[in-house]
Amino acid sequence: MKWTDRDIKYLVNNYSKRVHVDDICLYLKRGRRSVQHKAVRLGVGRKGMLVKRMGDVTPREIIDKRYYLKNKSKVHRRRMDRRWRIKLKLVKLMGGKCSLCGYNRCVPALEFHHKTKEKDASIAELIKNTSEQNVLKEVKRCVLVCANCHRELHQKDP
Ligand SMILES: [Zn+2]
């Protein structure tokens, strides 16, 4: 559905006045995403909110990017170190060996298996993308197993 001049005018006038988004949606007969997207494209902000237009880059992002390009290997190593440090901590916390066969020779060959089916992400993904506290919370729902036992578990229970 095309935005008419009248709709755009209404949006510009009401969006910045903190009229509730749901009310604007109702009036314009459009979804939240559509309304918010259009507002951002038009550069209309809610009071006290930083409006980011499409393609705008914040100074912070420019600095981060510059730093990354200059220090790629350092950033990469730090990331890997962080993941390794958290994994070691988790493995230690979970007893340091496969809970099924007792294997403990190689930490990278130890994995976390979710006891229940309800999981949002694997522990490896969480280590990569979220905080340490978050991983520690999630790991309580897992058992430590070696790679072989892990595959067997999933073979039995696909
Ligand atoms: Zn095992």
Image (tube, grey):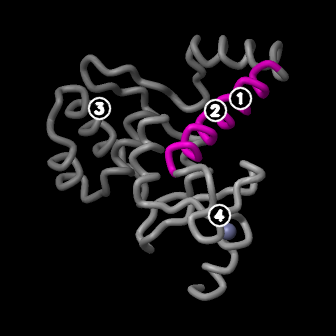
Q: Are marks 2 and 4 in contact (CB under 8 Å)?
A: no
Q: Quadrant of residue 102?
A: bottom right
Q: Which residue is mark 2?
A: 85
Residue 62: % across, % down: 66, 15
Magenta-colored stretch includes residue 149 = no
Q: Is mark 4 within 8 Å of ligand 1?
A: yes
Q: Which residue is mark 4?
A: 102
Find the distance from the CA under tag 1 to the CA under tag 4: 26 Å
- Which quarter holds ligand 1? bottom right
Residue 12, which numbered label? 3
- The residue lying at 67 percent from left, 80 percent from top is 152
Amino acid carrying mark 2 in the image:
Arg
Residue 123: % across, % down: 56, 53
- The residue lying at 42 percent from left, 33 percent from top is 40
Q: Quadrant of residue 149?
A: bottom right
Q: Nearer the viewer, mark 2 or mark 4?
A: 4
Find the distance from the CA under tag 2 to the CA under tag 4: 22 Å
Find the distance from the CA under tag 3 to the CA under tag 4: 65 Å
SS class, disc 1: helix
Q: Can you say whether 87 is above or below 72 in the image? A: below
Amino acid carrying mark 1 in the image:
Asp
The residue sitting at the front extreme is: 102
